[in-house]
Image (tube, helix red, strand yellow):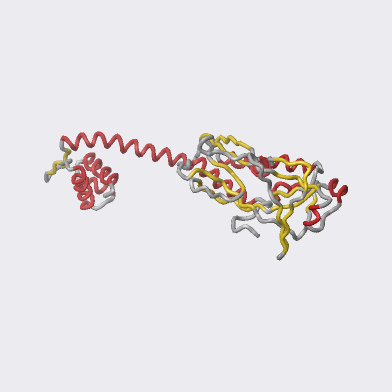
Amino acid sequence: MDNLTAVRTFLRVVETGSFARAADTLQLPRNTVTKLVQQLEAHLRIKLLNRTTRRVSPTSDGTAYYERMARLVEEWDEVEDELARARSHPRGRLRVDMGTTVASLLLMPSLAAFHARYPDVQIDIGASDRPVDLVGERVDCVIRAGTVTDPSLIARPLGRLPQAVCASPAYLAAHGVPTHPSELEDGHTLIRYVFAGSNRFQPLALARGDETVQVKGRHFVSVNESGALLSAALAGLGIMHAPAFISGRHIDSGALVPLLAGWRGPDVPLHIIYPANRHLSARVRVFVDWMIELFRASPYTLPPGPPRA
């Protein structure tokens, strides 16, 4: 038995004083109304209604039950109405964390469009490349590159990040233009990206057809933040290997030069992540959906799918 339907039916019978009138207002067959009230009485093990040929009236227990349940059902309806309004007009504070270049290069240029669509949502953005404790730091969702294996998290795919190898014209004028990845081991300098909070660095593995080359190389500077990585490349401090959305605009402008045509590394998956056991509020839901739209439209990202080898 659907208890809420039975309770609503009982309330309507009391309010109309008739099974027939209750059936008409609920747009239900009269026998269905009768059966629902009988099932409710059987469930509660009390008699709720006195029935005569002329009228229906609540018993003393039925009157007490009606008074309590009428208030509860009214509150239930108010909560549902508020949630429905929240879904169509989300509001409140949204805490998001993402890498600095994702924030500055992909999110910020388009954020005004989100605000125009959802003006009552306040977004607090943490921009860093460090790992974030979603629960401990009370963050609603994070955007991160790489594979997500934690079963306590839900990871919605935003897209894949193709990688690019590039350097500034000044660097190439001083050191020459490499034509094969093996040349990066001698006579060239890489800008090393070290993952924040660890000593692990991002490896450089490039493939062309059946040939694969792992490059270690030497570096003059290492950084643990992607904005600093880009700044180092623009300053001519070495060759950068990073997602194409970081270098794309600068390659388009000529400030950076793409290298090793035909060679590519594996695409990196990008996800928006939130705890699996947390209620997903309307403001988080609309932000997640909007971010998926944003990344689908970016010329520097690829649709979700298996990474290219």
Q: Residue at x 22, y 36 (%)?
A: 65
Residue at the far left in the pictured view: 53
As rendered, which of 173 and 305 lies closer to the eye?
173
Quarter holding residue 61: top left
As rendered, which of 274 and 1 lies closer to the eye?
274
Residue 174: x and y, percent? 88, 47
Residue 102: x and y, percent? 65, 43
Above or below 216: residue 118: above
As rendered, which of 223 and 3 lies closer to the eye?
223
Q: Residue at x 74, y 48 (%)?
A: 247
* In the displayed structure image, the side of residue 161 where residue 40 appears, left or right: left
Residue 273: x and y, percent? 54, 45
Above or below 177: residue 118: above
Above or below 79: residue 202: below
Residue 215 can be seen in this image: yes
Residue 18: x and y, percent? 19, 44
Residue at the far right in the pictured view: 174
Residue 248 can be seen in this image: no
